[in-house]
Amino acid sequence: MAGYVCTTAGGKGGVGKTTTAVNVGAAFQKAGHDVVVVDADLGMANLGSMLGIEHAETLHEVLAGDAAVSEALTDAPGGLTIIPGEQSLEAFADADPAKLRKVIKTLRNAYDVVLIDTGAGLSHEVAVPLGLADGILLVTTPDDVAVGDTVKTAQLADRIEGTVIGVALNRVTKHTDVADISDRLGFELLAVVPDDQQATMEEPLVLNAPDSRAASAFAQLSDSLEGLFFRGESVTDMGTVIEEEWFVDPDEHDADEEKEDEDDGSGGVFGLFG
């Protein structure tokens, strides 16, 4: 059985596409699935440097016809496999995005899950991974520009007949109007990931800071996606990965309960809790 190909995408840079791909991938690997993460951000590749991994061949060399896919496979923490990218302009110029189709076909026959990390914007380099995916996971932060750019990415996916499975909303605080952002995006909100200042910067968080709130959100997102990827479950049956306790300051006193009671009519802090 061929593996599931999932592309993480979003119109704006710095919203956590790579972080999401790495942590979901590591969580799947930890659960016993063979996973590969592909750095298809051809202009600004950063997967290898994020994980602090030394590598030889890269995706760029594969797309340039100078290396085989097997030569670019690189071991990462937790048994995860990655195909890193190259950061030089020369490598970017030589890489042919059209050849990514053959790369992904090879990988889906060898791995249970293939996660493709994409770049920002609406370029051809971004469109190709969208079209190759079984499902597209949109990633954004609450920033207005990021949300707007994510909507544009979804529109691009629709034009090339890509399938958006839902949205992961990163760097959420207790002040974020999650319900409003969900309405603007118009897709199932699969995960609300807290802005966790206590989490270590060393990725992946699910391995290096498993008790952090962000790691917990990514691990639960992976659990939800497992049903979609392998058991044919519907996205609408998954629900939103979110726990109200992630957004409660541990130093706050119980005296705030009266104010919380006043907010009950809105459905909780985010308008999502019953």
Image: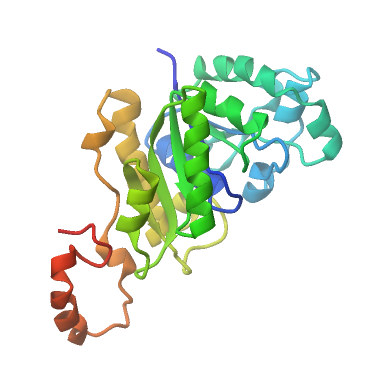
Location of residue 141 in the rendering, given as x and y in whole percent from the top left corner: 47, 56
- Residue that extends furthest to the right in the rendered view of this protein: 90
Scheme by which the image is coloured: rainbow
48 on left or right of 196: right
The quarter of the displayed image where residue 83 is located = top right
From this view, report whether residue 257 is shown above or below residue 189: below
Which residue occupies the foreground of this view, 40 or 178? 178
Q: Dividing the image into 4 quarters, which one contains the N terminus?
A: top left
Whether residue 211 is visible to the viewer of this picture, yes or no, is: no
Figure label count: 0
Location of residue 66 in the rendering, given as x and y in whole percent from the top left corner: 81, 19
Location of residue 53 in the rendering, given as x and y in whole percent from the top left corner: 68, 44
From this view, report whether residue 227 is shown above or below residue 106: below
- Residue at 28 percent across and 63 percent down: it is 270
Which residue occupies the foreground of this view, 171 or 110? 171
Q: Dividing the image into 4 quarters, which one contains the C terminus?
A: bottom left
